Amino acid sequence: MPAISVRAPAKSILVGEHAVVYNRPAIAFPINQLQAKTTITAKVIGNPDEIEFHAPDINFHEKFSDLPKDHPYKIAVSIIKKEARIDHYPSCSVQINSKIPIASGMGSSAAIAVAIIKGLSQFIGLSLSKQRLADLAYQLELHYHGTPSGIDNTVIAFNQPILFNKEKGFHAIFPKSDLTILIANSGIQGNTKEAVLEVRAKWKIEQKKYEAIFDRIGQLVLNAEIAINTGDAINLGKIMSENHQLLTEIGVSIPQLDTMVEIALSSGAFGAKLSGGGLGGNMIALAPPELIEKVAENLRKAGIQQIFFEKIYKVENE
Ligand code: PMV
């Protein structure tokens, strides 16, 4: 029976979250050890539009026809029908799996959006450029995520480190040396939508102050790109830590994340910060390879259970 299977990685924001919503740049990278996956199997007997959706991780099993109009899976099918200019989608079973922790700042919803759009398009032989894939996944995300900046779906669809600016677009980044990163989940679910709304409310009251903070974050991101391009992990670490202070100032950190940052720094990390929307979710630390296990050990001692190690690899000849 014809079947296809596609994947999309998780992501982490290295520097620049929140300010990116206000048209400053941000840098993000994919995390390929954590992925969302869509598997689509044709149903031999079945009428057009007879589609089943299975998301076993969350015990979700529904028929397309039984889903409410605004359900993301239903919207995904309409997006693809419109793109392919077809009235009906072939009968099939769509299975969605994800190993990405939810509400943790790791792009779980964007990865699922990219994996569904990629799967539904490939299954009917519709070829999408990476940019079109990113755009259609963004359309899908808009339905359940307010107004995301677009950094998540872009870094995930292109699957490479990028510097992203909402207004100016993005470009790939080519690290001069490997970067050893640790990502630790605080265990407290973040809430990006709420965090973005809270920042917006405060920005309205104190625009001058917030614009100045976003300007500084934007400058830090440009400095971070230089540090990455020149293999200067020490400076990149300092930039990340300053970025964390600024995220604290705009009110999106929580004491647990601040403590995790302190533990990472006192264990020898070059730098550490919360990553993603905040109010929970994860912390990322950049550390010398020989100290990364020590950072993890000290975080585990403080009760942190979910820790991932990731390398952003240097790119030769760029
Ligand atoms: O929490 P995440 O991984 O969805 O990241 C949100 C990043 C923000 O800059 C806070 C919002 C956005 O849309 O860019």
Image (tube, rainbow, N blue to C red):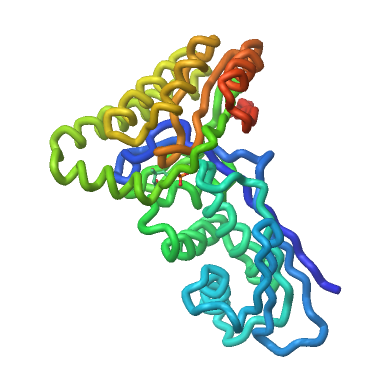
Is 223 left or right of 64, judged from the image as shown? left
Q: 161 or 49, which lies in front?
A: 49
Q: 177 or 277, which lies in front?
A: 277
Q: Position of residue 242 (x, y in %)?
A: 35, 21
Q: Quadrant of the N terminus?
A: bottom right
Q: Position of residue 30 (x, y in %)?
A: 58, 40
**Residue under the image location 47 percent in, 60 percent down:** 141
Instruction: Judge whether residue 14 can be spotted in this image.
Output: yes
Q: Position of residue 71 (x, y in %)?
A: 51, 72
Q: Quadrant of the C terminus?
A: top right
Q: Position of residue 37 (x, y in %)?
A: 69, 55
Residue that extends furthest to the right in the rendered view of this protein: 1
Is 286 left or right of 123, judged from the image as shown? left
**Residue under the image location 73 percent in, 73 percent down:** 93
Residue that extends furthest to the bottom in the rendered view of this protein: 47
Q: Give the number of marks.
A: 0
In the displayed structure, 125 sits above or below 15; it is: below
Q: 81 or 66, which lies in front?
A: 66
In the picture, residue 183 is in which quadrant?
top right
**Residue under the image location 50 percent in, 64 percent down:** 136
Instruction: Judge whether residue 232 can be spotted in this image.
Output: no
Picture quadrant of ligand 1: top left
Q: 29 or 100, which lies in front?
A: 100
**Residue under the image location 44 percent in, 62 percent down:** 144
In the displayed structure, 84 sits above or below 137; it is: below
In the picture, residue 305 is in which quadrant?
top right
